[in-house]
Image (spheres, grey):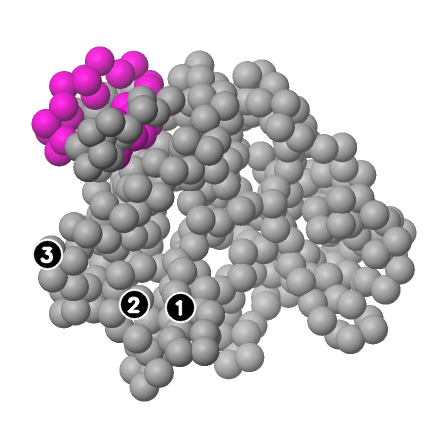
Amino acid sequence: MALISKKKIIYPISAGLRLYLIKYSREVNIPIHYHELLRYSSSIALYDSKDQDTLWETVFYDQSDREEIHLNVKKIYALLKAGGDMSVMDHLYVDRVDLCVYGNTQPFRIRIVNRINDNFDYFYIKNADASRVYGLELEHLLSPNRISYFVHKTTLIEEHIAGIPGEMFMKNYMNDPNLNPIRIAKEFVKFNERCFVRLLGDMHSSNFVIDVTPDFEETHYRIRAIDFDQQSFEGKKSIYLPQYFKENNALIQLGMKYITPESMKQYQSEERALIANRLKSSQKEIEDILRTMEEDEISTPENTDSLKKELAKHYHKDQFLECKNMGQILRVSLGMMWNKERSDLAAKIPDIPSLP
């Protein structure tokens, strides 16, 4: 069972990370910042359709502040979704501003509604934590999912990642007659591998969603991380493996029932090959983000020392023991996978030219 040792430290955006964000257009001027949303005058608990407390609070602003705040958050939505085309704001309004009072960074969630058809969307305004920014960027580069986010000073803006929350899926959908248990078990194996290779931790059922896509013959599933605070922070190997969280037991049991050891190894190899392809196609960005991480402080010396020893033992590779920080550990993890995929390909096609 995986357990987080203690509350994670919040790391500021370093000068090096700021330069990376500017270089790749992730640093964007915005008209309102996180601390300004804290000027609310009152709040009420937010309940779901079944009268269950969501642990979010809906906040309210004085009349003198509300119009300006709502206008500015709509401008942020236009930057996030329409490249800054402010004409989209004409038919949008801010229906609700919610605050997550139990979250590590206490994010605000904005509900935007289209008054023409009542369609709605969400986005988030948060304190910028360097760990989370690294996690978002690595998700964008190394996973099958593209991520829309940007930063300005100490504020982080994130899109909403749609899907069925993991705990809700396991509670309400596991007995659905239309569920394809083999496909969802396979996706969990691949998700587990993605998290481990790129060192994204704390992926229990509250921190991922399941995107369900019906097809003409079958239903496809994709598990998507929605919380990136634990990117390369913890010192325990198990924290980076979703298979060790008791909250994920229903999916783990599906895997034990439907996935053979041979199939599991195949799915793990498939996922590593896909990550290797993404490494190849985004070499410059990956090198830049790794170099930035290597020069940054995103974990404690104790966690770094513990993780490198556990990974050296797991992989039987002493190269991990030479690492001085989490950025170097991640580089070795990705480099091992890349070198293995390259050597496997060369073994199949002996005269293949050397890959970059």
Q: Residue 5 location in percent, x, y?
A: 27, 39
- Residue drawn at (23%, 59%), measured in percent from left and top? 246
Which residue is located at x 29 percent, y 42 percent?
Answer: 272
Return the mark for residue 220. 1
- The region drawn magenta spans 312-341
The answer to whether residue 39 shows anywhere in this view is: no
Pointer 3 residue:
261
Decide whether residue 137 is among the magenta residues: no
Q: Which residue is at the front of the view, 316 or 133? A: 316
User: Is residue 215 visible in this depiction of the protein?
Assistant: yes
Q: CA distance from mark 2 to mark 3?
A: 16 Å
Residue 251 versus residue 217 in the image, above or below: above
The residue furthest front is 351
The residue indicated by pointer 2 is 183
Residue 26 spot, x, y in % from top left: 64, 32
Tell me which residue sits at (16%, 64%) in the image: 259
Q: Closest to the observer: 234 or 23?
A: 23
